[in-house]
Amino acid sequence: TLDLYLSINKNREEFMKQIVFASNNKGKINEVKAILKDYDILSISDMEKMLNKKIIVTENGKTFKANALEKTISLYNQIGDNYLCIGDDSGISIDYLNGFPGVYTARWLDKGDHFKNLELLKKLKGVLKEKRTCHYTTVIALKGKNIIKTFEYTLDGVISDSPRGENGFGFDEIFELSNGLTLSEIKMEEKVKISPRKKALM
């Protein structure tokens, strides 16, 4: 576990409290900070300022796991082994669309999240609710000097008939839970409790 790994490095107290996250996505960063409250979460931008260099993180994998590993290892190789790095790949897989958009959730269309969500809803126009099942998957990759691990969790739901809520990001506004609310309609504290990202991070 992360705590076990960090406990082995007791002589590196400052390092122990810092985790570099392979992302500049504000929504993801805020969620990770809410989950890992005891640690100083640094983004790619933070590291670029600290190291005064450009950091390029790639994701060319065909699975969530491959992408999470690629991003994490890419970041780690650019900032050095004094840091513990984590990378995330997440997405929504819609059963009626044969798993689309899956690993391409963030980049299947070069538009903002809300626009992409509207386009997904168009693809499901007229589809009955029982056939609108979907899965929110997160894989977290962890890379340190003597460790490399991945952790994967999935949350099941259905695609709503329309975007609802203002508290989320990405596809949250169309991901409907069993209680009838979307991830954007619940508070951050509630979302964190059920988030696959939290389960993978913990």
Image (spheres, helix red, strand yellow):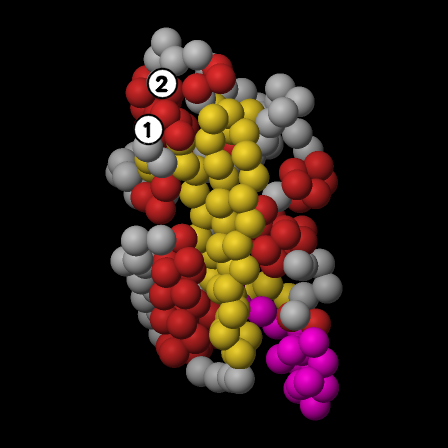
Q: Is residue 68 visible?
A: yes
Which residue type carries mark 1? Leu
Q: Residue drawn 55% across and 25% down?
A: 176
Local SS, label 2: loop
Q: Element at badge 1?
A: helix
Sequence order check, earlier mark of 1 and 2: 1
- Closer to us: 188 or 201: 201
Query: In this view, which residue lies farthest toward the top?
Result: 126
Q: Nearer the viewer, mark 1 or mark 2?
A: 1
Image quadrant in which the C terminus is located: bottom right
Numbered circle sitting on residue 88: none
Please rate how many residues cluster around mark 2, counting C-alpha atoms within 10 Å: few if below 14, some from 14 to 19, many from 20: some
Q: In this figure, which residue is indicated by the disc labeled 1?
A: 97
Q: Residue at x 49, y 55 (%)?
A: 139
Disc 2 designates what residue? 124
| Residue 11 found in image quarter | bottom right
Is 121 positioned to the left or the right of 149 in the image?
A: left
Q: Quadrant of residue 4?
A: bottom right
Residue 46, placed above or below residue 134: below
**Residue at the spot x=67%, y=85% of the render?**
9
Residue pictured at 41% horizontal, 36% vertical: 93
| The quadrant where residue 126 appears | top left
Query: Looking at the picture, how far across and down is residue 141, in whole percent?
Result: 49, 64
Q: Inspect the image, locate mark 2, and give the three-letter code of the amino acid beneath it.
A: Leu
Please give the range of residues in magenta: 4-21
Magenta segment includes 7? yes
The CA span between labels 1 and 2 is: 8 Å
Position of 20 relative to 197 (above/below): below
Mark 1 burial class by Cα count in 10 Å: few <14, some 14-19, many 20+: some
| CB under 8 Å between discs 1 and 2 | yes
Q: Is residue 106 above or below residue 157?
A: below
Relative to 162, does residue 36 appear above or below in the rendering? Answer: below
